[in-house]
Amino acid sequence: MADEQVSLTSLILIVVLGGLIIRYLFFSSTTQAPRPQRDPQSASRAREAAVERIQQMFPQVDRRTILWDLHRNGGNIAATTERILSGRIETPPVTFQPPPLPTSPSPSSAQTQPFKTPSKPSEPDLITRYNLKEKINASEEAEAAKKTKAWSSNRDERQASLQRRRDEMILAARKKMEARIAAEKATAEKAQ
């Protein structure tokens, strides 16, 4: 037994396996807890992004309740979403004071306020916008008669052709929408 020797391949195998075991035990990413964010501003932004994401899915749940649940489960969005879906979300205690909203208003935080509708629409509908009210009742044959060649070398003819195509598309979409609404009404009346 004193004459036994260790081969070079056995030695390399032992070193590699030892290194892998040490790496697994001490440097594994699955055994370490996620590192907390050190910068308070980035933590605040991440928290607000999580609240905004959840409020976009569930606008009926208030910000304070979402923050409480995120605080309880360590910022896990999936767990909070699951609690809301199952109806197990708890109201925060009176002593819970959520951090204030960020001072600089961002465009995404303005959207988080639920059920806030503008007093007037930003743009009118396409029929009004492109003055197509008189074309609504026009027959399809009249529109087909107006069609010219597919593409012209004259700039004005091309522009007129493109505008006519746009108008036809808008009117076709309107007809499809009216047909869909009529079909929905018919199915609703049958159900009653």
Image (cartoon, rainbow, N blue to C red):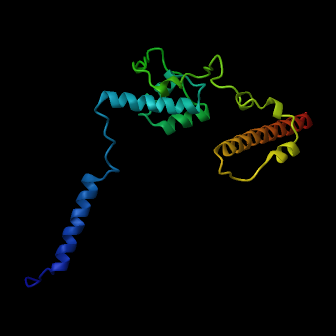
State the image coordinates of residue 134 (x, y, percent, origin top left). Answer: 83, 30
Q: Residue furthest left?
A: 2
Q: Check the image and report above or below for 120 versus 166.
A: above
Question: Residue at horizontal 25%, vertical 58%?
Answer: 23
Q: Which residue lies furthest to the bottom in this view?
A: 3
**Which is nearer the eye, 178 or 181?**
178
**Which is nearer the eye, 48 or 147?**
147
16 left or right of 106?
left
State the image coordinates of residue 186 (x, y, percent, origin top left). Answer: 89, 37
Instruction: Quadrant for the C terminus, please.
Output: top right
Question: Residue at horizontal 32%, vertical 50%?
Answer: 29
Snapshot quadrant of residue 90: top right
State the image coordinates of residue 163 (x, y, percent, origin top left). Answer: 70, 40
Question: Residue at horizontal 76%, vertical 42%?
Answer: 168
- How many numbered discs sit on the rendered protein? 0
State the image coordinates of residue 8 (x, y, percent, origin top left). Answer: 15, 79
